[in-house]
Image (cartoon, rainbow, N blue to C red):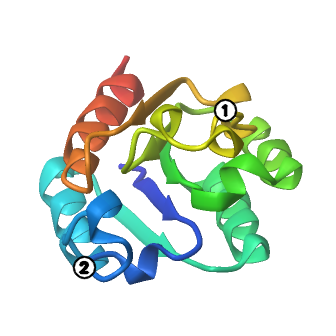
Amino acid sequence: MKPIYVLNGPNLNRLGKREPHIYGTTTLAEVEAICVEAAGERPVVFRQTNSEEALIDWVHEAIDEAAGILINPAAFTFTSLALLDALKMFEGPVIEFHISNIHKREPIYHRSYVSMRADAVMAGLGATGYGVAVGALLRLVEA
């Protein structure tokens, strides 16, 4: 059974401490546990990086290894054409996920390059929303 990849971009390693009024107090380790539990029998590859290069390399790895990708690209959402190009090569389902509702935030957060490839976009559910997103990704994988 192919795993799902849960990929997280810059500054998400600071969850639980970073701007808790926006991102809450759930840590990245807790997010990983939520994802693994929500995936049930499906293996989960869970990663976080502050490097655009590493994130793109993991998408390339997923092209060959993954059934689906759940990605919170964080700031790279709004800046990375290279990430978009990598995601366009992935043939399985992709869900773009954001902890906060990016559409309620400053205008710079309203244009997502990743959305141009994503099969679905989820935003504003908080860190615990990762479990909902994993469930949705599993349904897309199985469809």
Amino acid under disc 2: Ala
Q: CA distance from mark 1 to mark 2?
A: 28 Å
Label 2's element? helix
Q: Position of residue 60 (x, y in %)?
A: 73, 59
Task: Give the left or right position of residue 73, taking residue 136 as reference.
Answer: right
Q: Position of residue 54 (x, y in %)?
A: 71, 76
**Which residue shows up at 59% across the image and 73% down it?**
10
**Which residue shows up at 16% across the image and 49% down it?**
38
Q: Is residue 141 above or below residue 47?
A: above
**In front: 113, or 111?**
111
**Which picture quadrant has residue 132?**
top left
**Which residue shows up at 46% across the image and 56% down it?**
5
Quarter holding the C terminus?
top left
**In front: 12, or 37?**
12
Mark 1 surroundings: few (<14), some (14-19) or many (≥20) residues within 10 A? few
* Mark linked to residue 91: 1
Which residue in the structure is indicated by mark 2? 29
**In front: 46, or 31?**
31
**Which residue shows up at 85% across the image and 44% down it?**
85
Task: Give the left or right position of residue 118, taking residue 54 as reference.
Answer: left
Q: Is residue 106 above or below residue 118?
A: below
Q: Position of residue 64 (x, y in %)?
A: 66, 54
Q: Position of residue 98 (x, y in %)?
A: 44, 47
Label 1's element? loop
Amino acid under disc 1: Glu
Q: Is residue 143 above or below residue 23?
A: above
Task: Give the left or right position of residue 53, taking residue 1 as reference.
Answer: right
Mark 2 surroundings: few (<14), some (14-19) or many (≥20) residues within 10 A? few
Q: Residue furthest top?
A: 143
Number of numbered discs overlaid on the protein picture: 2
Q: Nearer the viewer, mark 1 or mark 2?
A: 2
The answer to which of marks 1 and 2 sits earlier in the sequence is: 2
